[in-house]
Amino acid sequence: MKKELSKGLKRFYGIGDLCFTLMSQVQDVFFNFFLTNIALFSLGTTTLITTITTVVDAAFSWVYGAIINGTKPMRWGRYRSWLVAFTWIVPFIYTFKFIKIGEGLLPIVIIIAAGIVSSFIWNFPYVANMSIIPVIGKTPADRMQLSSTRAVYSRASSILFSYMGLPLADFLSNFVGEAYKFGALAFVLGVLMVIGYFIHFKLTEGYEEPLYEETPVVEKNNRPSKEKKGTSGKSMVKGLFQNGPLLSLIVAEMTRWLANFVILGCAMYYFQYVAGNSGMLATYLLVANIFCMVGAFASKYFAKKMSSKILFFLSFMLMGGMLVIARLFYSIPWIVIILMAVAQFGFGCIYSTSPAMFADTAILAEWKTGEDGSAWIMGLGNVPLKVALVLRGLLINGVFALIGFSATETEQASTAIQSGISNVFLLIPGIAVLIGGIIILLGFKLTKQQIEQMSEDIEMRKSS
């Protein structure tokens, strides 16, 4: 196996994430619009479709890593194989999430099924892509390098999509028609995702060691051989529930994802009803995404000066603190944008450091159980993200109901409405992230030195 990270991995491990994010943003940005304005579904039907697809996706969020680790490795290794084995199917199914076929119940069933199945398939390469980080990154510095590069590409994708998403859809409409432009966009970017993960597949060639059983298996010719096997269910359960740092990390991750999704969901309301200028939203999104990408890039340099845990904790405090302070100046939009940009710098550091933190807990789990459960542990990072997506709508709609918000509000909304919107846009996310930081400080009891020693112990076990 190769030990040192290649120049290609250091520079380009993240292209797959860039392409994946471009593809997934079609649903994040345009799915609701497609349902209401293209498919012409009622708000009730739209809510039904989005709720079912989101809840089912969240319910399966823990499964992917368990399947990757619990089944026999495929031809190209336990993790690399999932980057290419079934990924090519996604564009063909994902497309039907944005196409209305027929009338009545039929199109609803097709769209829901396409959403659930395409998400189920693409989560395997997504989890495998994260799971291979502790496999190819032999040191904390290597893992942070991979995590940071991956995060930079992913955040750059958000900026790229803001410029190319709708224009590309409009261009494709010249060939397929207005009704099918988002389906065409989903297909094109789905193909791009397949290509991106194939690039990761090639970049990681030679870094993954096949896993074999300890006990020889006797074949028909009575000659002993070694059979590939999966990680036992007992080891996966132990790797979770006897892993305090992992449990605290999962809870903390949910606070930052919830904050992120709530901020995205409320931004339009803030700039329309509080700032009184919805046109400022584009400026905010551009500035925030740039600062987030810079934070993701800078984190690998910060990590050289401090441990991943300290960087993670400080980033939570920075993001949460800026959000709370911004609430004090909610009536001055430009100050809010500046403070939110700094908060997004912190989010970029969190986003970049998170895979390295999960990789550390995967090493702890393997050190305790003697079995590699990287995909299981790294896949659990999907759980807080999916749960936060479900909670986002409940939180936003719940607060809006409490403050008596109505879509008929004018841009000169009452002070009480403006204050309530600012609370859900700034204060509540800020408090949530600060709580997440405290959870990391108190619950993540792993040091850089401990992880290095555990890694050496694991390598010694394998070599013996």
Image (cartoon, rainbow, N blue to C red):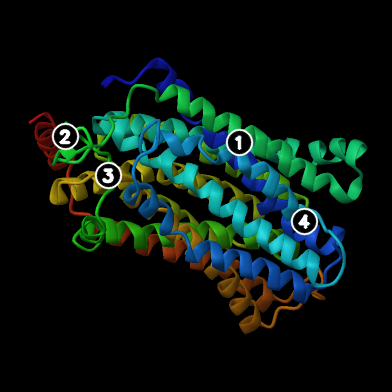
- Label 2 or label 3, whichever comes before in sequence order: 2
- Label 1 or label 4, whichever comes before in sequence order: 1
Report x, y in % for residue 276: 76, 61
Q: Please, what secondary structure does the residue beneath circle 4 have?
A: loop
On the rendered structure, is 294 left or right of 290? left
Q: Please, what secondary structure does the residue beneath circle 3 have?
A: loop
In whole angstroms, how far apart are the C-alphas of marks 1 and 2?
Answer: 45 Å
> Image point 28% across, 60% down: which residue?
248
Marker disc for residue 277: 4
**Hey, which quadrant is residue 336 in on the image?**
bottom right
Q: Nearer the viewer, residue 193 or 444?
A: 193
Q: Dot 4 surroundings within 10 Å: few (below 14), some, or many (20 or more)?
A: some
Quickly name the residue at label 3.
Answer: 229
Q: Is the Cβ of the residue at disc 4 closer than 8 Å to that at disc 3?
A: no
Mark 4 or 3: in front is 3
Q: Nearer the viewer, residue 407 or 143?
A: 143
Mark 2 or 4: in front is 2
| Whether residue 108 is situated above or below residue 313 in the rendered picture | below
Mark 2 or 3: in front is 2
Specify the amino acid type for callout 4. Answer: Asn
Quickly name the residue at label 1.
Answer: 193
In whole angstroms, how far apart are the C-alphas of marks 1 and 4?
Answer: 36 Å
Quickly name the residue at label 2.
Answer: 222
Q: Dot 3 surroundings within 10 Å: few (below 14), some, or many (20 or more)?
A: some
In whole angstroms, how far apart are the C-alphas of marks 2 and 4?
Answer: 78 Å
> Could one spot residue 317 in this view of the protein?
no
> Could one spot residue 83 in this view of the protein?
yes
Specify the amino acid type for callout 3. Answer: Lys
